[in-house]
Image (tube, rainbow, N blue to C red):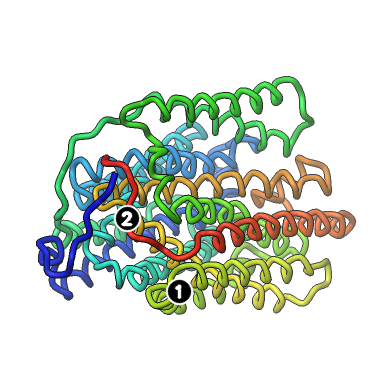
Amino acid sequence: MSVPHRAPGTVAAAARPAPERTGLALLVVVIGVMITAVDTTIVILALPEIESALRVPLASVVWVIVAYLLVLTLLATQLGRLGDMYGRARMYEAGFGIFIVGSLCCGLAWNALAIIGFRVLQGVGGALIAANSGAVIAEMVPPERRGRAYGFNAIGWNVGAIVGIVLGGLIVTYASWRWVFLINLPIGGLALGVALRVLRDRGPHRPQRIDWVGMALLGAGLLGILWAIIQLATRALDWRLGIALVGGAALLAVFLWWERRHPAPMLDLRLFAVPTLTPSLLAALFQALGNFAVLFLVIMYLQGVRHLSPLGASLLLVPGFILGGVCAPLGGRLADRVGAVVPATLGLGLQALSLLLYARLGVHSVLWLVVVASLVSGLGAAAFYPANNAAVMRVAPPRALGVASGLLRMFSNIGMIFSFSLALLVASRAIPARLAFAIFVGTTSLSAAPSAAFAAGLHAAFYASLVLVGIAAVFSLSRGRPTARAVGPAA
């Protein structure tokens, strides 16, 4: 459906808030991104303590992370749609409230089922925040300045990642693992208070329908494949895992069939007719698929091969996140000036270079190589994320900004989930599977004997990630110059 162009000075432009209010609103969005990033990284270092304290089975402890990411993936587009229906600011604020309650419950969890279930609740809040954050920015910031705004958004992610890995190391070393979750209460409460004061809904609210069947099909399909891949890290392929893989793939095929026929689909396939949108989403998918595992792989190397403490391992990665946070607004500003293709593809190239550096790590490598690789990766992230996010929101139809923001989050989260499981699967080929799994979640470390073999397995995982990031770069290059929002769904 063609969408008429709005000239400067229209009602939409006039409705934009004053600059100082925009700054506060952007700060709230950045804090929201920050706390969701904290919970993506901080839990990694707390897994051994959680496993021990709650007696979580080794094969189940990984779901403390995966359950959170899976819920984010399933709800991303639907909760973006709720923002279009009831107001993006309102849904964003609701996300903060649910996230705070979920964090409190996680901190009070008493067994394995409780911690995984409360992580699901926390994921619902995180999904509301993530799915509507991009749309809130798009609603408050004019198109020619959104790249810079998404650059500040990337600062939130990098600061959150830094806080997550440092606090995770400190908490695991000096305090109870429960503070991994309870730390969200004061931060989230402050952000929610500011959000209630400064965020206002400006776009029209339109009734829509939730695609419950589509959500169930996608969830069951992803869960089947994901469960099988994680199980393959600790056991050989058998008929049960084969059924899970084939059944999951079949359910995803049925999901696509259903989406083509549903009047209000979870995944509106008409959005893929918008020029440059599809390659931007696929670039986000493959970048996350190749790059999200890197944090886990490096921590596996530092703790398993080099026998560093959780805090010592995390501190070596901090410089890269700091550089990424500092440079992200510059990357966004560059995207505003020259378009998304150059900075996004350059960023992917830098991340590929960092993977080559990580692949050189061995049993006796100098540890400063980890710092250099993290700096290169952080610079690449600063160039890629703001440019690619701005590219998606620039071409999204104005009446579907929430759906487009959720769609971008969904593609990224699918990449993150399977990056996590594929990294575990590839690295586990080098040494006995259960030992690799234990090292991965931090419950044991390697003796000198298998260290070289395990390092070789990590090299294979880094090279596999390199291929995936290369595919992302191909999609980034293929999108060409951005065009006006000429095509898109009415919903």
Q: Is 185 positioned to the left or the right of 63 in the image?
A: left
Task: Please determine whether, in this image, residue 26 is positioned above or below residue 490.
Answer: below
Instruction: Tell me the CA gap for discs 1 and 2.
Output: 30 Å
Residue 318 visible in the picture? no
Q: Is 461 positioned to the left or the right of 474 in the image?
A: right
Which residue is more in the foreground, 60 or 231?
A: 231
Badge 2: how crowded within 10 Å, few (<14), some, or many (20+)?
some
Which residue is more in the foreground, 385 or 95?
A: 385
Extreme residue toward the right, this view: 449
Q: Which residue is mark 2?
A: 485
Residue 449 visible in the picture? yes
Which residue is more in the foreground, 457 or 76?
A: 76
Which residue is more in the foreground, 470 or 22?
A: 470
Badge 1: how crowded within 10 Å, few (<14), some, or many (20+)?
many
- Which amino acid type corresponds to the residue marked 1 in the rendered image? Gly
SS state under label 1: helix
Q: Horizontal and vertical percent for residue 83?
A: 25, 45
Q: Which mark is residue 194?
A: none
Residue depicted at 50% across the width and 72% down the height: 343
Q: Which residue is mark 1?
A: 325
